[in-house]
Image (cartoon, helix red, strand yellow):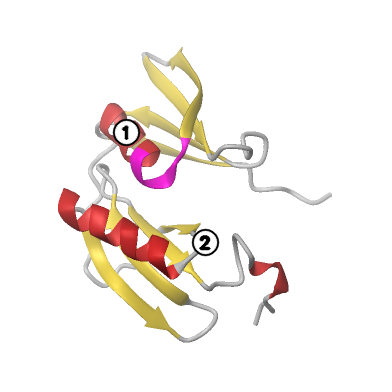
Amino acid sequence: MHPTLTHIALHVPDLDACIEFYREFCAMGVIHQRAGKGSRIVWMAEPGKEHQFILVMMPGGQQRQLAATDYSHFGFAVESREQVDMLANKARAAGCLIWEPRDEPYPVGYYCGVVDPGGNYIEFSYGQPLGPGSEQMPIP
């Protein structure tokens, strides 16, 4: 037996704001929604990955208040440094950039950090041994 990670489920304080954030910044789409336990449950996925990994969100959560030294985050890989910079500029304009773009030694790569409407941190990275184009990179 070998378990496969298929989803992360979150209670969020503003479901619609989180849906819009993940559409706008992460290119995820709503693939399913339903009423559930007195609320609305939404499944979101990246295009083409609907059967691999989804984000499940439902209203009712508390706003996360992460300390400045807390690096808990969701990681999204992008295809270039320019995409990291573009997302950082977009987040800066929206007032949700938390980590300016920076370079770190392999395997961390080039990344920036953004906070979603629920207070969750999101990392956008390029040059890690994960995501687009990483098949040729060794995992340390």
The percent position of residue 128, horizontal first and vertical second, equals: 55, 72
- In the depicted structure, whether residue 87 falls above or below residue 7: below
The percent position of residue 73, horizontal first and vertical second, equals: 40, 59
- Residue in the foreground of this view, choosing between 60 and 121: 121
Q: Which residue is drawn at the image coordinates 53% and 73% (left, top)?
A: 127
- In the depicted structure, whether residue 127 falls above or below residue 38: below
Does label 1 or label 2 sit earlier along the sequence? 1
- Which residue, as the protein is rendered here, is positioned at the far front? 82
- Nearest-to-viewer mark from 1 and 2: 2
- In the depicted structure, whether residue 118 falls above or below residue 13: below
Q: Which residue is mark 1?
A: 20
Q: Which residue is drawn at the image coordinates 27% and 68% (left, top)?
A: 99
- Residue in the foreground of this view, choosing between 105 and 35: 105
**Left or right: residue 92 compared with residue 16:** left
- For the magenta stretch, what is the residue range? 24-28
- Which residue, as the protein is rendered here, is positioned at the far bottom? 105
**Left or right: residue 56 compared with residue 139:** left
Q: Which residue is drawn at the image coordinates 71% and 67% (left, top)?
A: 135
- Residue in the foreground of this view, choosing between 136 and 115: 136
Q: Which residue is mark 2?
A: 79
Q: Is residue 9 something one can see in this rendering?
A: yes
Residue 82 is labelled as: none
Residue 7 belongs to the span the image colors magenta? no
Looking at the figure, which quarter contains the C terminus?
Answer: bottom right
Under circle 1, the secondary element is: helix
**Left or right: residue 114 compared with residue 42:** left
The percent position of residue 124, horizontal first and vertical second, equals: 41, 61
